[in-house]
Image (spheres, coloured by chain):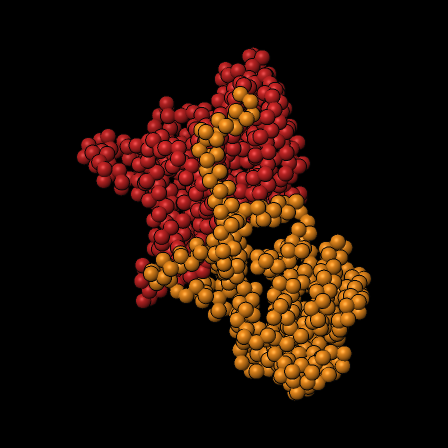
Chain colours: A red, B orange
Amino acid sequence: MLFNSIKYALFLPIVAVLFWVLPQRFRVPLLLAASYFFYMSWRPIYIFLILGLTIGNYYAGLLIAERPQAKKFWMITAVTANLLVLVYFKYAYFADETLAAMLKPAGVTVPAIPFEIILPLGISFFVFEFIHYIVDIYRGGTPVKSFMGFSLFASFFPTQIAGPIKRYQDFVPQFLAEAKFSPACLDEGVTLILFGLFKKVMIADNLSFFVQGGFSNPQLFTGLDLWLFTYAFAFQIYFDFSGYTDIARGSAKLFGYKVPINFNLPYLANNMANFWHRWHISLSTWLRDYLFIPLGGSRCSKWLNYRNLFLTMALGGLWHGAAAHFFFWGVFHGVALIVHKEFQNVQEMVAPLKQFVQSKFGNVLSVILTFHAVCISWVLFRAETNEACVSILKKMFFLEPIQQGASMLAMKLPEINHPLIYPSIYILLPLLVASHFVMGYVNEKKLLDRVPKSMKAVYCFALMVIILAFSPDKSPRFIYFQF
Amino acid sequence: MNFAGQLKELVKTSYVTWAFIAFIACDLFCHVAWPSLKLDHFASPHHSMVWWNIDDFRKQKENPDIVLIGSSLLMHALHGGDAEYLQVPQNEVFHHKSVMLENLLKEKTGANVKTFAFPLAGQMASDAYALTSTLLTGSRTPKAIVYTIAPRDFMDNTLAHPASTEIFKFMNHLGGVQDVAWDARPGFLDKVEYGLEKLSAIYDHRQYLVYLQHKYAQSVLRLMGFKNPDEIHTPFELRRLALLDLPESTGVNERFAGPNLKYAYTDNTAEYCMRYQPFKEKPFRTQVEYLERFLGYCKQKGIQVVLVNMPLLEQNIQLLPPGSYDLYKSNVQQLATKYDARFLDMQDSTTFTKEMYCDSAHMNGPGGMKFFSLLSDKLANDTKLAIGKKNTWQ
């Protein structure tokens, strides 16, 4: 059941109305039933997977809390079991193929997996939530006593498929406490849903047609064209994923619940570390708390710190998918974070450089450089094959031989006039860049808090009309559903 | 606080509620205002082959005597046949008549017969009914319809439901097929979507609104040197991708049928296996019912109908589930008899040999010429048809 489908448009209001009509004691069971129904609408059999993991982690949590002498054993057992499930469903083919490729030169044939493994939707997200729960209980947290409450934490339908990755300490108390309907929740929830839908169907979906053309056929385009496709993908993935997150947060808000934010204008980041404070925040904080810090974090030698950064980001890349390009995407970010750290060290030694970086111009330059570094990483993320990725990057950096008589600045894109998104891209991309800066200013000055309700009503009304009238008949899936 | 009190509070304090009320008011206003604005329901942001075909039909000054209706089987025969016959390439976007059939009927009967063709890929029996009952009505009623049919028009497993085709949607949008609009959508969600269209004037007119959006965007882009949107200058690889995700658009410079082509044969058995197998009784019966509706409509309007069973290669017929070809033919024949329509069975593997096909179903240029030559013979010599009674058309 996609968020941008008629099914969800029927499902959500029905569940929300029932939620507020029913007495408090029926609300958690209702949400749990709705969440399982939501999950089963995709592939019913996998309900046993989520149920099995829920039961296992629930009892593991209790065991860790109740048996302090064996808590390490139970923690390791539970985390390993969760990871094994994730590895089996997500990385079995990848491991098999990688092993086969590695052993081939030695003449060893590794048989292919003889059966089909279908990746369960949302597994990367709910497994990370389970691991967080187990580790936090091990660190002294209080386990959730209510089985139903714990089940809902893991399966809550707005965040079930692609996060944000929740923390049980923040989330569980919300639905165990008595909720009272408030018009503010309705306002905030519906506004977030409408804005999320707008981002998804009006911006990301339209950009996807453009991006698909370039990344599927890089041989048709020049380096400058490919930069435009890459910029477009940067905005597509941002609007797609942040649109999804807004709908998820808005849906949760309709029940009076808060789930964490995931984005904070990431392309305004002025360095790579700052980018990860603004991009997929619930994942980056998870990686920090449950991977980077257990590895030793930054309270160690410089080289160990760099190793930890590198490993965290490389594994974070692999979390996105079982493919080499996701691993290299993570590696790129790991290296970029190390470079940033080194650059910070250099700045400390060279005072004029520090002054320049902290100046207004230096900041703008930093934002531009960071954005371009992120864009290069998006090529690794989006390219359809490794060969295509190398070819795109070579073209973007003008490393491919240019035909005699051809200009380095030649472009093929202006010749293309269909679909309309191709010629429109020259208007759309600057608008999207401008929107980022405008939103940055609005957030900085907290202007949204001062907007009168009547203006907010006009804004919602406009979104309702736009979404209803201009949504495409066919909408691609949210990008992060595949993870 | 009781429910009424909560509702009152909501209306008083919630800006989303205000927006929703404003939206309903706006939608109601649109319900009232749209009819007086006389919007062009034909306006579409995407110029598909269906759109070009109907656009051409609207522009016809004279009413056609014979209307040819059919799927891609007719399309290939018509364009390829006329290209071979005239030895001139035919632009498929604008070519909507059979010059060859007109000339041959003139030779054989002396009558100046004017034809118009609706050769639309993927057309089902339900589409034929939608098209006929929507467009061929009032002053636009032809004297005869030659409806070229084949088993795929009745059993295509790639079709979700009758209302899911572009032709059906377009006819529905033009105000047609209201009598079957509900039944043509068997799924709950399809009915919900249709209900939403009827409920919300904004949603119902979204095609027109998107058309306006495109129109104004194009005006802005023209200032930047944007080329004529009816001509498409996009590499084939990108066109193919666009067709997967976006509504079909065809440029006026994109589809030509040429004479004297070296016709390569394409093996399309995998595609037809998927379409034919397994045999599904219910969709087949539904399409037969639409054929009956079509015949009933034509009889009521006094339109003579000629049902032409299109020739296929034996290997295509062999892909059909056992017994289904006979079932298809017997059903069509029974209905033809019931509604006084003619049934011409052109299936003849000795006349239509493999050299006359591009694949197991679609004829090439020479095949098209052969087909129209035989069709003109049969029409001219059939005394039960007005055209066969020599000069009774004028």
The image shows residue A144, relative to residue A232, as above or below, that is above
Residue A190 percent across, percent down from the top left = 48, 35
In this view, the residue farthest toward the left is A352
Residue B332 percent across, percent down from the top left = 77, 66
Residue at 44% in and 29% down: B13
Q: Nearer the viewer, residue A150 or A258?
A: A258
Q: Nearer the viewer, residue A92 or B67?
A: B67
Residue at 70% in and 76% down: B353
The image shows residue A307, relative to residue B240, as above or below, that is above
The image shows residue B84, relative to residue A274, as above or below, that is below
Q: Nearer the viewer, residue A243 or A76?
A: A243
**Picture quadrant where residue B149 is located:** bottom right
Residue at 43% in and 54% down: B213
Residue A311 seen in this snapshot: no
Residue B36 seen in this snapshot: yes
Residue at 75% in and 53% down: B282
**Picture quadrant where residue B49 is located:** bottom right
Q: Nearer the viewer, residue B346 or B339?
A: B339
Residue A289 percent across, percent down from the top left = 45, 25
Instruction: Please tell me how many numbered marks the rendered image carries.
Output: 0
Residue B136 percent across, percent down from the top left = 63, 68
The quadrant the C terminus of chain B occupies is bottom right
